[in-house]
Image (spheres, coloured by chain):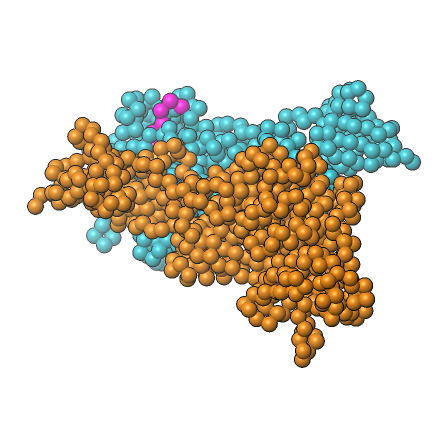
Chain colours: A orange, B cyan
Amino acid sequence: MNEYKVKILPMQLEVMVEEGTTLLEAQRLAGLEPDAPCGGKGTCGKCLIEILSDGPVRTEKACANRVTQDMTIRVIEKNKGHRLLMEGASQEIDVKSAISSAWIKVDPPKIGNHNTEWQRVKNALSKVYAFRKDRDFKIELPLLSGLYEQLKDNDGMVDTILYKNWVIDIRNKKTDKFGIAFDIGTTSIVGYLLNVETGEQKAVVSMLNPQTQFGGDVINRANYAIEEGVQILTQTVRKGLNELIEEAVQKAGIDKNDIFMASIVGNTCMHHLYLGISPKALVHAPYNPVMSEKLEMRADDLNMNINPNGRVIVLPNIAGFVGADTTGVLIATNFDAIEEMTLAIDIGTNGELVMGNKDHMIACSTAAGPAFEGAKIKCGMRGMEGAIDHFELNGTTFKYSVIGDLVPLGICGSGLMDIVAVLLDAEIIDETGKLVSAETAQSPAALANIDRLVELNKERIFVIYRDEQDPRKNVFLSQQDIREVQLAKGAMAAGIDLMAKTLGIGISDVKKVLIAGAFGNYMSPKSACRIGLIPQELSDRITPIGNAAGEGAKIAVLNYCEFQKSEKITQKVEFLELATRPDFQDCFIDHLSFE
Amino acid sequence: MNEYKVKILPMQLEVMVEEGTTLLEAQRLAGLEPDAPCGGKGTCGKCLIEILSDGPVRTEKACANRVTQDMTIRVIEKNKGHRLLMEGASQEIDVKSAISSAWIKVDPPKIGNHNTEWQRVKNALSKVYAFRKDRDFKIELPLLSGLYEQLKDNDGMVDTILYKNWVIDIRNKKTDKFGIAFDIGTTSIVGYLLNVETGEQKAVVSMLNPQTQFGGDVINRANYAIEEGVQILTQTVRKGLNELIEEAVQKAGIDKNDIFMASIVGNTCMHHLYLGISPKALVHAPYNPVMSEKLEMRADDLNMNINPNGRVIVLPNIAGFVGADTTGVLIATNFDAIEEMTLAIDIGTNGELVMGNKDHMIACSTAAGPAFEGAKIKCGMRGMEGAIDHFELNGTTFKYSVIGDLVPLGICGSGLMDIVAVLLDAEIIDETGKLVSAETAQSPAALANIDRLVELNKERIFVIYRDEQDPRKNVFLSQQDIREVQLAKGAMAAGIDLMAKTLGIGISDVKKVLIAGAFGNYMSPKSACRIGLIPQELSDRITPIGNAAGEGAKIAVLNYCEFQKSEKITQKVEFLELATRPDFQDCFIDHLSFE
């Protein structure tokens, strides 16, 4: 049987194939991956090529044309971009990662031609990346070491992997390329392993932030860093990320070297500690970060165990305690394109708020979070097995649900909100936040539950679960717990008020409330409004949007333009420093009571 | 005594000084180094300032004006650039290193101002580097770690050290900044320690290239790398450079951390081995480098022990065996600005040639060097103590000189040239290169020295020094040695011929011959022409220019524009690959005989 040469443009590939081979198959033999969903049946019209040796003639059926002589064809790239609907995000994004790859054919060295191997690689790349000049390409030095032999052994056909204009790997065969997006929270770290070409999520991994051993909240952790040096905290979190990478590649069954980039979001303190920057500036007035700009670094410089030439991008901070995690929320929600007045709330260990629309965005930070994560609440705990997560009143009977259907061990954030809301409605907590006593109980629900209204160490408490054997295992709400909720909700409500005031709008002008953070999925919007964490008039405009900070990190991995845009967004956001507003204290006190 | 505040622009410095202090002294108290060669006598007119609080009034005598109230002054920068006449170079260069520094006053953090420390550093830098936008500045991450405290402890007054737009160090006080230029030769490595602000040379250090243990010439060394892996050679030379750095800082009495950049020149093989690139491409047709472009790297990535944020620049190669060392020669000689036809010859272990002028430059490489470095010559040795370095004929008596005035141990390159030239004139070598025997001797000098014309192992030799006790210690020239000289000079002469031919000129159109390399300083131009290494008609146009490759490396450290320009020059140079010229063999054979 005769063999013919098929030359494939624009990649300049050449392949010898047997007579009668389809042009689709010829592309595959040349190492390409033509898009042919119909499997070569000639029905999908996706394998668009031009047969240049015939005219040129354009055909949508490479699969229906067979090789009968030497031929030259040109592959027409259809819009091969993947589009992805991000979780909780209002936008579809194009998958256009900073990581790209090109299967190229590099010309062999020729006597009389003085082009170096690298120059010939650049020449081949210029044909694929027509928008770049060849002098724009850069290469990581270690890849040059064996380049002469690699090209020789593979007849010049290699897969080049690029981070923007940097060649960061050259491989003998095509492989999938991955990125990993990290959301470094004060309490937990989540990693999302993504295929950077398709956007497909290959694994999600998470862990307790191992820095927790040095302080549960931002302030304690920052103080530890200031006293003991930031390095120990930096090493700890970087080691944590490497453990997550290890876990993610095992889950997905891939090679660590195939992860070519990572992205990072986190609050300003987590941001600084990850980068090895002392958080001292954050805890002293005027509470600014030391740096806020987005960063592009080499993975090596951050001790991250992905491909040795891989890159890490860090999203920019906004200001003070409004960090790169909030930037992630803004990207994920496409906030700077939103027409209607919107309030985004990210409740983590801190509460970060953004209000506005595409024309004017205001951000602030409040210490709302810790109470809802269990801190400073006597029976408080995180949202894990044994936590009371919901609470309601049926007539005069209280009902609660426990995560894992176990005997209750404590109260998590959503449970705390429900309990306070329900006890307010039941007139067991009055509008100043005072818990009624057995003596002062008047409402039917209070009277029906008078045995729950007791004192412990001279403090009024409301017993939710009573352990008959061991009263130390009782689960209850204390007067002091209610005060903590009041402080948290007062700060957040005051923040919301002052943001609206600064924007020159009324609260009811806010058309949409987006609750980011896992907590947003669990809490009852009704309770949040009842206790005044969110203004009552917005109760039917609340949408939980999941871990939007993490979504932002994922978008940064999958779409480099969005990452670039992120810094511009942060510069557009006006930062409202609550502490410096003369009207803050007044507004805060005003919001301490329940209505 | 009263104290007054002096504000100094454009640096935004503020200093409190006693009444009556001169404005010159006030600048010094603010940490500046005003240029006042007269020592404050009011005679040099260099300390140019504007007193803004007075009008403004411009004065050239900051030293003659005293502080009598709070004042604001503006320092006028005169052209403070240093100009340097480079050794052996035809040009004066401006000292404008990629390394610069700025003593700045960073605004303190203020409540209500959300600028980060880094933003405020950028703001201060923008005032000094008015041609840069503040977003252009970048900073090495480790410098941010303690930036908040550093600024606080120093009232915001710090010395910032930049590599181009990158802040690579921030210091509490001003110090000198250094760079080091390396010329990595096949045989020896030279390092030049330079003050990057004044251009002053602080130390010169050199060593035998420690890679010599893996092969004395380029080909043997390349083969070792190909067989055993390039890493061992890379590590060896990098370690060597670090030893030279150690030696240089000790000689100059400075701190390694004050070296902020280094430059590298070397032939293509040394270039590849330093960078860790396999030299395989260099020793297989078509003998191209794997990469030629200039490089800017971090010192860390090349294991170079200078300031941890320092940079290393590597000059570009031209082609084949015409490497970055020749690029150095081109920069040092400002070759691309030369009007008249010029021939530059760099005789090291290889001989590299460039012919042309600013309009057309041609380069080629020949294996001329090894014979003149002692390789393959029976009594050959390097130009060190005990080497016969000059040789002449007085009537019929031969006279030689020996380096160090010792008993001769061998013959170095310049001696070899002299001996062959003198023996040709004495008709002891005939024009075919044959040594006369005692039997065929005819000329008076031959007859007078007939006892020197003997045979050793059936080969004719000419004895130069006879050791009466131990004939093994005799120093002589053998017939085979003359053949080696013929091969070397034939190759070089053919190269020169073909370059002229390609340029379309005659040999006599070459107006200037520049001999680079230490060897150029020692050899006799007359002998070089007599043996035909350089055409006879050029004998009175020869100028030795010293280690011009090394000068090129120094210029690259001291003037970043020259470094940038270097790549453009290499792209303008036409590479003449002698091996592929069909007329080379003919021309080569033609030049084997002596005239």
Position of residue B94 relative to residue A585, above or below, is: above
Front residue of B38 and A155: A155
- Give coordinates of residue B394: x percent, y percent: 37, 36
Q: Residue at x 59, y 68 (%)?
A: A386
Q: Is residue A130 left or right of residue A388?
A: left
Question: What is the magenta segment's predominant secondary structure?
Answer: strand
Front residue of A172 and B84: A172
The N terminus of chain B lies in which quarter of the figure?
top right
Q: Is residue B221 left or right of residue B297?
A: left
Q: Residue at x 26, y 44 (%)?
A: A36
Q: Is residue A345 magenta?
A: no
Q: Residue at x 87, y 28 (%)?
A: B68
Q: In this picture, which residue range is highlighted in magenta? A: B358-363
Q: Is residue B359 magenta?
A: yes
Can you tell which quarter of the image residue B22 is in? top right
Front residue of B299 and A407: A407
Q: Is residue A558 left or right of residue A584?
A: left
Can you tell which quarter of the image residue B438 is in? top left
**Is residue B195 visible to us here?**
no
- Give coordinates of residue B23: x percent, y percent: 79, 30
Q: Residue at x 49, y 51 (%)?
A: A181
- Give coordinates of residue A369: x percent, y percent: 66, 54
Position of residue B509 relative to residue A127, above or below, is: above
**Is residue A198 visible to us here?**
yes
The C terminus of chain B lies in which quarter of the figure?
top left
- Give coordinates of residue B431: x percent, y percent: 23, 35
Instruction: Tell which residue pokes out farthest to the right in this image.
Output: B1
